[in-house]
Image (tube, rainbow, N blue to C red):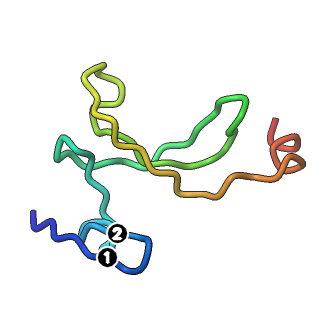
């Protein structure tokens, strides 16, 4: 897996992110999940591939912008 970094202004990207593939700091694929917490219901994110194993790294990236208060109320 080739993993080069790029910078553009205030943002930096890994080649894997530019290709639409996300990998956590463990080097594992970072699947897209959906949050169902009270503060972020329905909001999608990428997290560590070991998320449910308890051995997770700190990789976390939101896919969606934060929803408006009204959108959150409708989802709940």
Query: Residue at label 2?
Result: 12
Which residue is at a point 87% across and 40% down the rendered structure image? Answer: 73
| Residue at the extreme top | 54
In the displayed structure, 56 sits above or below 49; it is: above
Mark 2 neighbour class, 10 Å CA radius: few under 14, some 14 to 19, many 20 or more: few
Residue 7 numbered mark, or none: 1
Mark 1 neighbour class, 10 Å CA radius: few under 14, some 14 to 19, many 20 or more: few
Residue 17 numbered mark, or none: none
Query: Horizontally, is 21 left or right of 27 in the view?
Result: right
**Whole-percent x, y for residue 68 in the image:** 82, 52
For marks 2 and 1, the one nearer the N-term is 1
**Whole-percent x, y for residue 53 in the image:** 29, 21
**Whole-percent x, y for residue 43 in the image:** 63, 47
Which residue is at a point 32% across and 39% down the rendered structure image? Answer: 48
- Circles 2 and 1, Cβ within 8 Å, touching? The answer is yes
| Residue at the extreme left | 1
- Quarter of the rendering containing residue 57: top left
Which residue is at a point 86% across and 46% down the rendered structure image? Answer: 69
**Whole-percent x, y for residue 6 in the image:** 26, 76
Please state the total of marks drawn on the protein image: 2
Query: Dividing the image into 4 quarters, which one contains the N terminus?
Result: bottom left
In the displayed structure, 11 sits above or below 67; it is: below
Query: Horizontally, is 56 left or right of 37 in the view?
Result: left
Mark 1: which secondary structure?
A: strand
Cα distance in 3D space between marks 2 and 1: 4 Å
Mark 2: which secondary structure?
A: strand
| Residue at the extreme bottom | 8
Query: Dividing the image into 4 quarters, which one contains the C terminus?
Result: top right
């Amino acid at each position: 897996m080739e993993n080069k970094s790029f910078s553009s202004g205030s943002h930096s990207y890994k080649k894997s992110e530019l290709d639409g593939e996300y990998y956590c700091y463990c080097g594992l694929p970072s699947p897209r999940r959906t949050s169902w917490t009270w503060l972020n219901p329905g909001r999608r994110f990428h997290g560590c591939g070991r998320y449910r194993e308890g051995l997770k790294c700190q990789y976390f990236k939101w896919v969606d912008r934060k929803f408006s208060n009204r959108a959150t109320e409708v989802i709940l």
